[in-house]
Image (cartoon, rainbow, N blue to C red):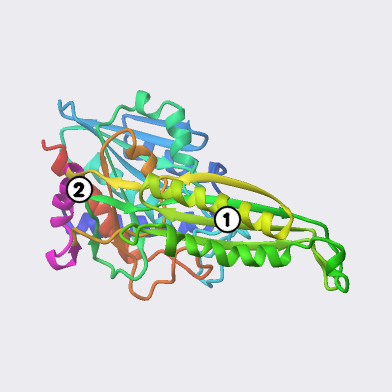
Amino acid sequence: MSSLNMQALRAEMCSWRQELHQHPEFGFEEKQTAAFIAAKLREFGMDEVTEGIGGTGVVGTLKKGIGTTSIALRADMDALRITEQGNYPYKSKNHGVMHACGHDGHTSMLLGAAKWLATESTFNGTIYFIFQPAEEWGQGALAMLNNGLLQRFPFEAIYGLHNWPGLPVGHFATCVGPLMGAEDLFEITLTGIGGHASRPHAGREVLVAASSLVMDLQTIVSRRINPADIAVVSVTEFITNGTRNALPGQAILKGDARSFLPEVSQTVQTEIRRLAAGTALAYDCIVDVKYTHEFIPLINDEQCTKAALRGAAGIFDPGNIDSNIKPVTVSEDFARFLKHVPGNFALIGNGEKSMPLHHPAYDFNDDALIYGAKYFIALAESVLIA
């Protein structure tokens, strides 16, 4: 790789990233972002650029040589409904929405790789550059798949990556098997009879019942899940219709559960329903439980992970590559693709001092751009050997 050309590419990626950061768009609303991506792909000389896949998704197709192998490289492009706290010159101009997870960086890295592979590389086969909407709420990959992604762009393997705060820039991490967890959401509504705060005996208020249930839910992981398995159950919202001197007649608990195995997810759901029903019986109220499966576990394929590590070996220092990172309980929509084709998902460093993902002061580290782009390039060239 020409260092001069790479320096120019790095500068372009920084410019793209900061432009995208100023104009964040929520899931399935990424019209300006998609138009930006499509224009760049056409500028690079893609064989085909297809827009509107799964709503706002974009796919660039690049073919070289006579090879019949095809792979996909994927980036997510949506932002979050968070008000940015940073004071960067490229701060979000869309109030209440920001790139708090680094999807602006992911998109820019893949665009950088696409430009290089289109203009400088001599790989042999087909690459589909997938820019996915609505990753943050777990619907974008499914929307693209339901819109015929695999039939219209038949790839044999798929690769993606995510920046990781706390991991130094220039570091790479992945593993075979489970890397990221499933996310389930639950909403429990307890209904009784509210009344005057001075006369609790005259009604069936639900504040005490809901408080008891919050504590009981913590026993699911500690007492119902095998200690060898991983699970997290968190109540994240507690909503009542009471006021200062009125006891509530309704309480709503909302939360999320993480796991890596379908049977663990099912156990969590079963136990939540059992505990909720028991609470309603004990406190003489009515309960309704809604439980949904938003994200599925992300399971890396062994052969694709070996391919990813071969690609990373030419870019990252050997001591900066972790080939057996422990699974993390965050969730990633990329997992939907892995239900249909083998693939690998990896993490690259965003810096030890980076703010956490989804924090209002988070920012993608532009120093990581060149590592992500080089990784995608090396990976594609090692899989699609000329």
Image height check: is 237 above or below 24?
A: below
Q: Position of residue 135 (x, y in %)?
A: 46, 47
Residue marked by disc 2 = 305
Q: Position of residue 91 (x, y in %)?
A: 53, 65
Residue 177 lies left or right of residue 271; in this view the side is left
Q: Position of residue 242 (x, y in %)?
A: 80, 65
Q: CA distance from mark 2 to mark 1?
A: 41 Å
Residue marked by disc 1 = 275
Is mark 2 in CB contact (under 8 Å) with mark 1?
Answer: no
Residue found 49% across the figure and 44% down from its top:
293
Residue nearest the observer in this picture, 146 or 380: 146
Q: Secondary structure at mark 1?
A: helix
- Res 59 → quadrant: top left
Residue nearest the observer in this picture, 221 or 74: 221
- Res 141 → quadrant: top left
Q: Earlier in the sequence, mark 2 or mark 1?
A: 1
Count of numbered labels shown in the rendering:
2
Looking at the image, which residue sits at the far top?
151
Residue nearest the observer in this picture, 127 or 224: 224
Looking at the image, which residue sits at the far bottom?
353
- How packed is label 1: few (under 14 Cα within 10 Å), some, or many (20 or more)? some
**Which amino acid type corresponds to the residue marked 2 in the rendered image?**
Thr
Taken as a whole, is the magenta stretch helix, strand or loop? helix
